[in-house]
Amino acid sequence: EAQVTQNPRYLITVTGKKLTVTCSQNMNHEYMSWYRQDPGLGLRQIYYSMNVEVTDKGDVPEGYKVSRKEKRNFPLILESPSPNQTSLYFCASSPGGGGFPYEQYFGPGTRLTVT
Amino acid sequence: AQTVTQSQPEMSVQEAETVTLSCTYDTSENNYYLFWYKQPPSRQMILVIRQEAYKQQNATENRFSVNFQKAAKSFSLKISDSQLGDTAMYFCAFMKPRRTSGTYKYIFGTGTRLKVLA
C-alpha cells in the first residue's frame, strides 16, 4: 500500500531534550516536506526537500533540522525543543520531478507536546 | 509573498444541501496550482480537488467542484448533496513552482471547519 508513515504518533517530552520524528514514504517520491499545524494558523511549511541531499527552508524553520540521506526518509530533528514547538506535525511527499500533479500525500501526523 | 485567505472559520450545512467554502489568494504569478484538502476528525489530510491556473475549466470531482476566478484570485469549493462524512476541516492551498531553481513551496490557508447536520 502506497503510504507515508510517521513515528511516533504521539510524543510528550521536556524542554531541551533532543528528539527525532521519522518520516518514510514508499512511493519513490522526490519531494518531501514537513508542516506544523496550529489552531487558527493552518499548516505552515517547516522544511522541504526536492531530492536526496537537497533541502530548503519553509516559512517556519527556526528550531528544526532535517536531513535527506535516502530518498524514502526525511526525519525532522528538534535539537532543543521548547514549549512553543508543541504542535501537530505532518510529513508529506509528492512525486516532484518538475511535473504535475504536485499534490501531496500526507502522513497520519505526530502530536508533540513539550513541557 | 503569496498568501492564502479563508475568511470563514466555521460553517454548517444541512445534510443533502449545497455549501460553498471560500478561498482567496494573493500572487503576482501567472502559472500556479491550487488545491483543496480535507481533514476529518481522524486528522488525516486528504486531497479533495486540484486546479491548474492555466486551465480555465473548473475542476470537478464527483460532488466537489470549484469556482476558479483567476482575475479575482478566488478559488471556492462547492460541495453538493452534503453528507455527514463531509464533516471536516477544509484547507485551501497554493503552490508556485520556481522556474529558475525548480523548487516549490506550498502555502496553506487557516482552514474552514465544516459541520454537516443531520
Image: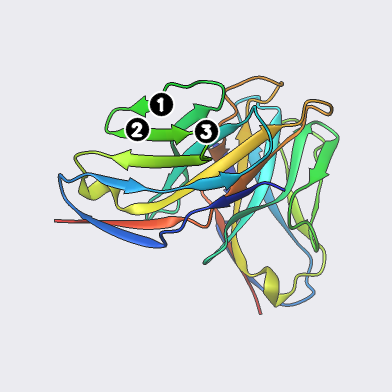
Q: Which mark is residue B65?
A: 2
- In the shown orientation, is residue B48 left or right of residue A90? left
Q: Quadrant of the C terminus of chain B?
A: bottom left
Q: Are marks 2 and 1 in contact (CB under 8 Å)?
A: yes
Q: Residue at x 75, y 77 (%)?
A: A15
Q: CA distance from mark 2 to mark 3?
A: 15 Å
- In the shown orientation, is residue B22 left or right of residue B35? left
Q: Can you see residue A72?
A: no
Q: Residue at x 80, y 61 (%)?
A: A62
- In the shown orientation, is residue B75 left or right of residue B102? left
Q: SS for tag 2?
A: strand
Residue A21 x %, y %: 68, 54
Pointer 1 residue: B58
Q: Nearer the viewer, residue A9 or A54?
A: A54
The local crowd at label 3, few if under 14, some if 14 to 19, many if 20 or more residues have their Cα within 10 Å, is: some
Q: Amino acid at mark 1?
A: Asn
Q: Which mark is residue B70?
A: 3
Residue B59 x %, y %: 41, 26
Q: Amino acid at mark 3?
A: Lys
| Chain at numbered mark 2 | B
